[in-house]
Image (spheres, rainbow, N blue to C red):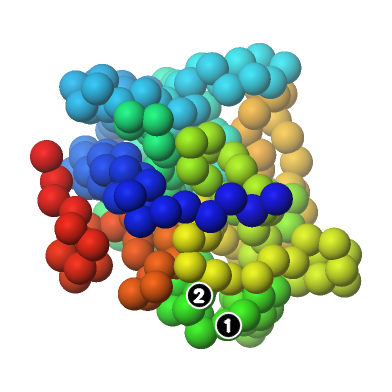
Amino acid sequence: MVTLKTRAEILKMRRAGFLVWKAHRLVESLIRPGITTRELDSAVEEFFASQGAEALFKGVPGRMPYPAVTCISVNEEVVHGIPGSRVIQEGDIVSVDTGCRLDGWCGDAAATYSVREIESRKKKLLEVTKAALDLAIELLPKRKYWSEVASAMQQLVQGEGFAVVEAFVGHGIGRKMHEEPQVPNFVNAHFVQNGDFRLQPGIVLAIEPMVNMGTKHVRLKRDFWTQVTADGQPSAHFEHTVALTESGVYVLTGPLCDMDKNLGFAPA
């Protein structure tokens, strides 16, 4: 069941989302050759704590509770990479996913960062994955059902010769990080028949295309969390928490924008 949010609730989610946006700007300022993924994670953890926000990822149940406040996935790692002693190298692409809860409401976002100069095919992978997210945001108020948006995302990605990851999807978000509905970045008959949902004001989604350079298939590493591409080729991941309102699309994990003025959001 999809839970629609009121204007007041969306504004509360914007406060959390704006902190997530700031956390990503912090990562962007720090990421460089020689820094470890653990150092990036510690910086985000300290930032959330300084803002009185609860990190969403740390302690998420699993065979081993998730031990960090970010997921940091490098090159062939698709998602859920555990920060540690790995040293970032020039030419890497580094996907960072994080979220927080502030005053009971959640924000969640991801981005893939290039570390200085990267090879052209990696650069294209990042461009196409980001373009798929941007296309979804653009189409959200223009389509009636999510399947129409997901189909356009899939066509864009596959048209560039890349593969949409199907093992993981986006999600609804609100008081909990994961709420209904599931938000795939692809379309198949099962989703159209059993999972498709109407796009209407008040819906808030974490839209997160994950795109692989080669095969769409992934495998789990022995740490019980990190997912890597089955063929060892690079992967990219971009995500925003997005609300559909009567006034249009509101990117809750983005920079300050006109929608903030329209709805009365002002950062603390």
Q: Residue at x 18, y 58 (%)?
A: 264
Question: At which x and y percent is residue 162?
Answer: 63, 71
- As displayed, is residue 190 above or below residue 176? below
Can residue 203 be seen here? yes
Residue at mark 2: 140
Q: Nearer the viewer, residue 82 or 171?
A: 171
Q: Residue at x 40, y 68 (%)?
A: 245
- As displayed, is residue 171 above or below residue 148? above
Q: Amino acid at mark 1?
A: Arg
Q: Residue at x 23, y 62 (%)?
A: 263
| Distance Cα–Cα, label 1 vs label 2 | 6 Å
CB contact under 8 Å: marks 1 and 2: yes
Q: In the figure, is residue 220 to the left or right of 61? A: right
Question: At which x and y percent is residue 182?
Answer: 68, 53
Question: At which x and y percent is residue 9?
Answer: 38, 47
Can residue 119 be seen here? no
Q: Secondary structure at mark 2?
A: loop
- As displayed, is residue 35 above or below residue 166? above
Q: Residue at x 58, y 71 (%)?
A: 199
Residue at mark 1: 143
Q: In the figure, is residue 6 to the left or right of 166? A: left
Q: Which part of the image, by quadrant, shows the C terminus? A: top left
Q: Nearer the viewer, residue 95 or 47?
A: 47
Mark 2, Cα crowd under 10 Å, few <14 / some 14-19 / many 20+, is: many
Q: Secondary structure at mark 1?
A: loop
Q: In the figure, is residue 267 to the left or right of 218? A: left
